[in-house]
Image (tube, grey):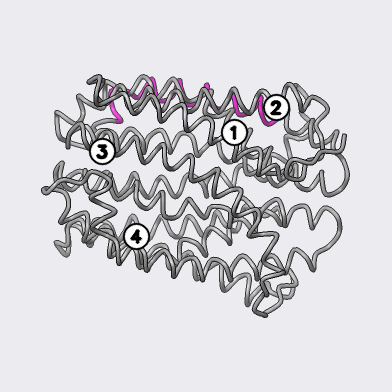
């Protein structure tokens, strides 16, 4: 684990990826900071919507997590034409799925928000926000696919510059539309829609026009047989992602039923946790790209060595985040709400949010390693087990009166179970680091 020979490759991928990954939760945090000035009902409406959109979009995260290792492995085995075809397939699926998600969100806005526990004071503004934000559904999935493709090509700089543009536009539009035009929560939704379509346009123009010949991207409609491998990966990753989202969505729903103040505080706490965790996911991106490439080149020993190094780096970064957020405990809560009750409630769970960071960091790196090996079926089973245990803890929160602290003990349970299941394979069954495809291994 002390081997430093991979650090240059890791940093070349991870540092730009860090900016890209931090951009999305940063947009959420910026929205939370501005919307928090509108009152607790607006903040609670944003929190409920965040859970709905996480479920809607992250379910299709395979467009990034599946595409990256598949493109990386194609490059590793010297088949750029296969990598180019994957670009077309990913964008085709992004368009089809994006239109489907948009339709579902528009048609079932009220039932979805009611299911999430939105009460009468929250339901009106939450519905307005959802129906506007749904217009960006195809854009979000184009961005997801574009990120995955560029990572597979070992390029994390281009997604970073696109993400930076998206964040800057959102930062400009949020105060202008929310306060300047007086649109309130709806202004936050329109700012996000405009920003995300800018990012989607950037990826589409670059990959299908400007750099199409470089990456050998064919402008054809892919058939079902061509889409089948990506769809299979998509199904396995969907099970994994759905398990994760169900438990995090359940956590938000439980917090909403505890009270408006609690769900508002939970929105801020979850945003902080997600921001900290996703900064570590930059190392997971490097793991996906490098492990996939080395496996494609037929170098499993090197793939294991770079994985060991990434796990150590992940743990160190997690410790650094723990220290940093501990030191700023007195400042951060006040940045996202000026409601004394929300801040007081947030402080009760803040220690759990911070202490989770080192373990969360290792878990995120594990995800990248297993995705790089295309061990999607194993990831799905491991996540399902972890989510079931965490869900059982969350189910006890309301009947036992544990409040928001109980919700966050459910989150702790999720991370601990994920560490145990993934670590069991990696340090036990996977000691010789098999080249994995699904559940099939060749040592």
Disc 2 to disc 1, how far (Cα)?
10 Å
Bin the neighbour count of mark 2 within 10 Å (Cα to Cα): few under 14, some 14-19, many 20 and up. some
Disc 1 to disc 3, how far (Cα)?
34 Å
Foreground mark, 1 or 3, reads 1
Name the residue at 57% across, 67% down.
Answer: 93
In this picture, residue 52 sits left or right of residue 1? left
Q: Secondary structure at mark 1?
A: helix
Q: Which residue is mark 1?
A: 382
Q: Are marks 2 and 4 in contact (CB under 8 Å)?
A: no
Disc 2 to disc 3, how far (Cα)?
40 Å
Foreground mark, 4 or 1, reads 1
Q: Are marks 2 and 1 in contact (CB under 8 Å)?
A: yes
First in sequence: mark 4 vs mark 3? 4
Quarter of the picture holding the N terminus: top right
Q: Nearer the viewer, residue 323 or 100?
A: 100
Quarter of the picture holding the C terminus: top right
Q: Nearer the viewer, residue 178 or 308?
A: 308
In this picture, residue 197 sits left or right of residue 310? left
Q: Are marks 4 and 3 in contact (CB under 8 Å)?
A: no
Magenta stretch?
310-332
Q: Which residue is mark 3?
A: 336
First in sequence: mark 2 vs mark 3? 3
First in sequence: mark 4 vs mark 1? 4
């Amino acid at each position: 684990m002390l081997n430093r020979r991979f650090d240059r490759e890791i940093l070349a991928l991870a540092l730009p990826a860090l900016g890209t990954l931090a951009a999305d939760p940063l947009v959420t945090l910026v929205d939370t900071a501005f919307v928090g000035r509108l009152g607790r009902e607006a903040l609670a409406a944003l929190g409920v919507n965040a859970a709905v959109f996480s479920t809607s979009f992250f379910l299709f995260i395979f467009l990034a997590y599946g595409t990256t290792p598949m493109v990386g492995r194609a490059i590793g085995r010297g088949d750029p034409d296969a990598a180019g075809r994957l670009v077309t397939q990913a964008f085709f699926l992004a368009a089809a799925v994006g239109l489907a998600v948009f339709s579902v969100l528009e048609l079932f806005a009220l039932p979805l928000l009611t299911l999430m526990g939105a009460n009468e004071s929250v339901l009106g503004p939450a519905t307005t926000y959802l129906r506007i934000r749904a217009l960006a559904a195809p854009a979000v999935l184009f961005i997801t696919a574009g990120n995955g493709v560029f990572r597979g090509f070992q390029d994390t700089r281009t997604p970073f510059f696109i993400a930076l543009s998206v964040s800057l536009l959102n930062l400009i539009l949020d105060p202008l539309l929310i306060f300047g035009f007086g649109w309130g929560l709806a202004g936050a939704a329109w700012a996000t829609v405009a920003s995300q379509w800018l990012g989607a346009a950037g990826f589409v123009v670059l990959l299908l026009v400007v750099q199409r010949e470089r990456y050998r991207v064919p402008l054809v409609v892919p058939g079902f047989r061509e889409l089948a491998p990506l769809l299979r990966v998509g199904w396995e990753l969907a099970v994994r992602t759905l398990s994760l989202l169900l438990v995090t969505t359940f956590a938000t729903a439980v917090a909403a039923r505890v009270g408006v103040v609690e769900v508002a505080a939970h929105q801020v706490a979850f945003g902080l946790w997600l921001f900290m965790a996703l900064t570590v996911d930059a190392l997971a991106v490097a793991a996906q790209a490098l492990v996939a490439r080395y496996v494609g080149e037929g170098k499993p020993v090197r793939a294991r060595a770079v994985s060991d190094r990434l796990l150590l780096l992940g743990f160190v970064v997690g410790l650094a985040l723990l220290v940093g957020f501990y030191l700023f405990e007195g400042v951060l809560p006040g940045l996202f709400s000026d409601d004394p009750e929300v801040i007081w409630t947030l402080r009760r769970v803040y220690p759990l949010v911070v202490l989770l960071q080192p373990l969360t960091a290792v878990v995120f790196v594990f995800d990248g390693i297993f995705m790089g090996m295309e061990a999607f079926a194993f990831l799905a089973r491991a996540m399902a087990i972890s989510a079931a245990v965490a869900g059982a803890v969350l189910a006890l929160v309301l009947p036992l009166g544990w409040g928001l602290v109980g919700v966050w003990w459910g989150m702790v349970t999720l991370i601990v179970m994920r560490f145990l299941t993934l670590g069991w394979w990696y340090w036990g069954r996977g000691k010789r680091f098999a080249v994995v495809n699904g559940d099939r291994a060749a040592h």
